[in-house]
Amino acid sequence: MIFKSIMKHKWVALFSVFSTFIYAGVQLYQPQIMKHIMTVMSSTTYTRHQMSDKIQGYGIELLIVAAIGILFAIFSTLSAARIAQEIGADVREQTYKKINTFSYENVEQFNAGNLVVRMTNDVTQVQNLMMMIFQILLRIPVLLIGGVILSITTMPRLWWITVLLIVLIVAVTAVLMGQMGPHFMAFQKLTDRINAIAKQNLRGARVVKSFVQEKNQIGAFDQTSDELYDHNWAVGKIFSAMIPLFTIIAQGAIWLAIYFVSTFVTNSQTIAQDSIGGIATFMTYMGMIMFAIIMGGMISMFASRGMVSIGRINEVLNTKPAMTFDENAKDESLKGSVRFDHVSFNYPNDEEPTLKDISFEIQPGQMVGIVGATGAGKSTLAQLIPRLFDPTKGTVYVGEKDLKTVSRGTLKSNISIVLQKAILFSGTIAGNIKQGKADATEDEMTRAAQIAQAAEFITTKDGQYESEVEERGNNFSGGQKQRLSITRGVVKNPNVLILDDSTSALDAKSEKLVQEALNKDLKDTTTIIIAQKISSVVHADNILVLDQGKLVGQGTHHELVASNKIYQEIYETQKAQED
């Protein structure tokens, strides 16, 4: 994933690498110029005029090198930022695209809140990691290797101090990074949990307020927040120990270098003159070595967090959709017949099947009702028809075609489902209706709205079909949201229309008007109505009765009242409530 994105923007990546290497090379070269300047200043072999000329020459060289360093530092930062943003955008888009191929089963497997965190927070972590790699990490081997070589060539007798510095800093870094690793592993899980709690609290704000659950919600959030705080504080304490330890090691190495150089001064005047410029340069290179190791350790620490995020994103990208379509299948028009052939269905991780060996057939143009007690499997059965789920056993046919053999476009153009929970998206009324048919004209939207009895409130708004829809349709009542959802379902004039208890928020008059409009204007459409109320399906051509996942009866209202015990119980209960 990351490698493909880098190759996609390879020229930016290569320029970033080139700029970083040049910048690192300049950093290594600058101490050599300073060494020459200090050596000239301490020399007794040059006249004042000669010394001035040489220092001016080295000074100009130093300015030129510094200017080159600044220029390529800017190039390095800009190109690193560019490649990091490009990779972040690619990964974010790929992740979102992949999520949209998931079936309900895949989404439930990950959890919606978890997927949002992976697409936002985890992608940001990857983006930050790429920025550090191209801006800092690529410099580290150049500074480390170059610093070691140049420090030893500058003061050959002190090579062991360089080795000692490296060993001590690497050892301390390894210990501290090992302690930080588990804390970073916990960060993302706790971030997921906090996001889920906040999301549930905000979505269920009315329930929370109604039942005065603010204190409990705050308590649950605080508990998770405190856990995250503990991990962050633990990392902070480790960091607080890191810098002093590195400082002590560096200062100790510098003290050793100065001490041993001072012993050289007493033994040889030549060594003393070379050492005046060499000791400062040697200490500069030791600082570079220390910086390279420390930054390498810190980046490895952040990289561990970034690698966790990469793993989480890869988990999404590598997940195969639970439902696939035949890419070679052509879009076609299906007849409105629906047939279930010994269909059973299990939700993931459920041992008991929700639907058990169900078989029935619906003829084109029929209106069919599905009734049963809560949990009988009505909505699950309905969701198998537009292939939101695939049956565990058996086959679902629409227009005598096995749904597993038809294209995604065929399903979309022939079958509409209006789900039990009316969901609207922020935007406009037209934008929501056109999700049912992208190229719907205003006349088609008006016709669909009239069938769904939504025209009566749409036309009262100033913008009419361009009127604003707030997030989750919060500026509409429950009944209005259901009628807009029905409008979205019928706008493409589907061959099969499924209404999954989608008139439950309507009053009896509005529900009757919707059913009459469906019978009149969509008489060639096969309509399947899932309902809690028998009054919603009493005029259906056929009614299916479900009980505990089994089909226990089918027939007209009068036939079932006369012969089906389950239907009789539901009917008598609802009749008593109405009386």
Image: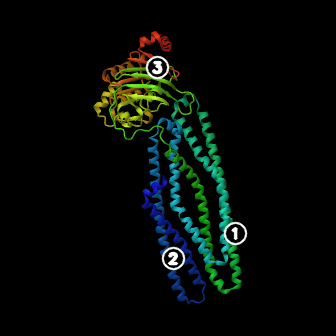
**Is there CB contact under 8 Å for labels 1 and 2?**
no
Please tell me whether residue 149 is drawn above or below residue 131 in the rendered image.
below
Residue that carries the numbered disc 1 in the rendered image? 252
Disc 3 crowd rating (10 Å Cα; few below 14, some 14-19, many 20+) is: many
Q: Tell which circle, 3 or 1, labels the residue nearer the N-terminal end.
A: 1
Image position of 154 (left or right of 118) = right
Please tell me whether residue 199 is drawn above or below residue 178 in the rendered image.
above
**Quarter of the figure with residue 242:** bottom right
Find residue 62 and name its label: 2
Q: Tell which circle, 1 or 2, labels the residue nearer the N-terminal end.
A: 2
| Of residues 251 and 487, the one drawn nearer to the viewer in this rendering | 487
Element type where label 2 sits in the image:
helix
Q: Residue at x 43, y 22 (%)?
A: 360
In x, y percent, where is residue 528? 40, 23
Element type where label 1 sits in the image:
helix
| Label 1, label 2: how far apart the Cα atoms are | 30 Å
Please tell me whether residue 285 is drawn above or below residue 305 in the rendered image.
below
Q: Amino acid at mark 2?
A: Leu
